[in-house]
Image (tube, rainbow, N blue to C red):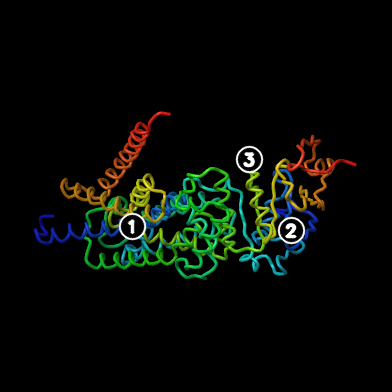
């Protein structure tokens, strides 16, 4: 790292933090849907197939992030359609695509020509250089995700809460479910830079889960999850800079510890609250 | 009209007309096809043979005119949603794909909540309510559609007798403007307010004038039943001949 010189190093750390904070926005919003609609496993599947896409990109020599987008969105659409049109059990399909993505990823990377990164860094995130072009791409994607959710808020709320009623109300529930899965796929792609394939699921679920402990309003849950995500990412990234670690593991460990603390805090709070109520 | 799931007949030879202003209760055991029958009227289940029309149209076209109150057991009780947001959902189809709800939508939702006497609870989370209150919220959502027909699936399941009576009073009041069809497996709950009763266990037997005989019920439930009924107003059937 010292080879880069202090200025470049500063720019790169700054970009890392910007990327992390940006990812937290989409994470909090889409993560809330993932948590309340119980889509954690499907999100895990989508994240892992990205590995195959990144591998393909290295094999054929195009931008890895495009490979990730291709595979993530492809998986989301495939899963959505098979669960609606066939009688295959959804979680079995997820499992199949999950391992397929991983296997293809390893295969492609071993056969890729030229300089390829260590698969570990793709899986668990790495201190890769986040260039300003990457940041621009992330900003664009985040804006797109936020806009779609703002415009489709009531429809997405309806299909996550009561799909049948949404259908009776004349809402194209099938297409909306696909849209939700695609939004999850794009959010996962945003996270790859920060925490890698395997750990992306942590940022998609933990901030929203923590936030869900403290509010029963979907919009507030999203807002709080964004803030929680930003705090967790900031602490995690600071630790990774301070102790010269890859960013994924410290972010995930900080998140898990925070979730446990939040659960304990909530218990304590409600106990104290009960003690405050006079006995009848 | 016939319905099959995977070649297994669920509904057979159903011939039912519900007239404007009717208040029909359909009784039958669990698995007797009651929910399926409602779903055919909503266009969620297509008949295998025969035809369903709602207000002279195919069911999918008449959706905006039907209010549906599903079985409440289906909901995720931890879902972060307020009473207000649920009732607004009744206005989903109103503005096409436009985001948000209009002022009129909010007024209609307010009115619907007032009709079921739940306006004061609009900021509450659905989880904070009792079973009876929750059921009222879902009735309000169905009313917010501004329906001509109201379909209710087991509206009294898990609700105590007193609250059930309130619910039936509410339905009787709504019946002044709206056609109501209610299905339930609980023969004890049919209120004297209901205009007509039908029994459903794959096949449908209609009883005009609320006359229900022990034989009809035994036929429907496929086992001997002992009918226990109090006098008015919880009368289930007239004297046997």
Vertical order, B126 against A71 (above or below): above
Mark 1 vs mark 2, foreground winner is: 2
Secondary structure found at label 3:
helix
To the question of a shared chain for discs 2 and 3, the answer is: yes
| Chain on which label 3 sits | B
**In 3D space, how far apart are the residues under numbered discs 3 and 1 (Cα atoms)?**
68 Å
Q: Where is residue A263 in the image (x, y as percent from the top left)?
A: 35, 39
Quarter holding the N terminus of chain A is bottom left
Residue A255 lies in quadrant = top left
| Distance of label 2 from label 3 (alpha carbons) | 24 Å
Q: Quick one: A249 or B222, which is closer to the camera?
A: B222
Q: Please, which chain is the residue tagged with disc 1 on?
A: A
* Residue A209 on image: x %, y %: 38, 47
- Residue under label 1: A109
**Pointers 1 and 2 within a single chain:** no
Task: Determine which of the numbered discs, if any, sits on residue B22 in the image.
Answer: 2
> Percent position (x, y) of residue B163?
61, 43
Contact between marks 3 and 1 (CB within 8 A): the answer is no
**Residue B155 vs residue A144, the one in the foreground:** B155
Q: Residues within 10 Å of mark 3 (few under 14, many from 20)?
A: few
Tell me how far mark 1 sits from mark 2, CA to CA. Answer: 69 Å
At a point 73% along the width and 42% down the height, the residue shown is B234
Q: Nearer the viewer, mark 2 or mark 3?
A: 3
Q: Mark 3 points at which residue?
A: B162
A210 to A175, vertically: above or below: above
Q: In this view, does A88 lie to the left or right of A64?
A: right
């Amino acid at each position: 790292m010292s080879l880069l010189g202090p200025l470049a190093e500063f720019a790169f750390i700054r970009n890392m933090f910007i990327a992390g904070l940006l990812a937290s926005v989409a994470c909090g919003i889409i993560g809330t849907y993932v948590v309340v609609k119980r889509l954690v496993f499907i999100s895990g599947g989508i994240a892992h197939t990205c590995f195959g896409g990144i591998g393909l990109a290295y094999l054929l020599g195009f931008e890895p992030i495009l490979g990730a987008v291709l595979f993530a969105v492809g998986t989301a659409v495939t899963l959505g359609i098979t669960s609606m049109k066939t009688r295959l059990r959804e979680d079995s399909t997820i499992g199949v695509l999950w391992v397929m993505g991983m296997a293809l990823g390893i295969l492609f990377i071993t056969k890729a020509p030229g300089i390829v990164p260590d698969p570990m860094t793709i899986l668990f995130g790495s201190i890769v250089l986040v260039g300003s072009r990457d940041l621009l791409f992330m900003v664009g994607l985040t804006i797109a995700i936020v806009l779609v959710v703002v415009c489709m808020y009531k429809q997405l709320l309806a299909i996550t809460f009561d799909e049948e009623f949404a259908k009776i109300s004349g809402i194209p529930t099938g297409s909306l479910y696909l849209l939700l899965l695609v939004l999850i796929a794009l959010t996962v792609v945003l996270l790859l830079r920060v925490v890698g394939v395997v750990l992306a699921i942590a940022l998609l679920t933990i901030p929203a889960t923590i936030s869900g402990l403290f509010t029963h309003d979907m919009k507030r849950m999203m807002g709080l999850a964004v803030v929680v995500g930003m705090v967790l990412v900031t602490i995690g990234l600071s630790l990774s800079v301070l102790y010269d670690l890859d960013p994924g593991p410290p972010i995930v460990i900080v998140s898990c510890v925070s979730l446990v603390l939040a659960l304990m805090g909530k218990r304590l709070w409600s106990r104290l609250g009960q003690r405050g109520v006079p006995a009848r | 009209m016939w319905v099959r799931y995977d070649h297994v007949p669920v509904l057979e030879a159903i011939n039912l007309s519900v007239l404007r202003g009717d208040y029909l209760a359909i009784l039958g055991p669990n698995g007797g096809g009651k929910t399926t029958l409602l779903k055919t009227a909503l266009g969620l289940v297509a008949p295998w043979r025969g035809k369903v029309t709602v207000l002279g149209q195919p069911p999918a076209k008449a959706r905006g005119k039907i209010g549906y109150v599903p079985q409440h057991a289906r909901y995720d009780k931890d879902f972060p949603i307020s009473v207000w947001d649920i009732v607004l959902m009744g206005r989903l189809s109103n503005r096409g794909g436009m985001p948000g709800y209009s002022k009129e939508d909010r007024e209609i939702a307010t009115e619907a909540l007032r009709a079921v006497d739940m306006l004061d609870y609009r900021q509450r989370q659905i989880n904070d309510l009792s079973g009876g209150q929750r059921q009222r919220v879902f009735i309000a959502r169905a009313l917010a559609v501004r329906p001509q027909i109201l379909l209710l699936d087991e509206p009294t399941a898990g609700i105590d007798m007193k609250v059930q009576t309130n619910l039936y009073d509410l339905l009787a009041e709504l019946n002044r403007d709206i056609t109501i069809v209610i299905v339930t497996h609980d023969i004890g709950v049919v209120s004297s307010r209901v205009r007509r009763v039908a029994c459903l266990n794959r096949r449908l037997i209609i009883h005009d004038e609320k006359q229900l005989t022990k034989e009809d019920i035994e036929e429907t439930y496929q086992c001997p039943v002992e009918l226990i009924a109090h006098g008015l107003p919880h009368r289930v059937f007239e004297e046997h001949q």
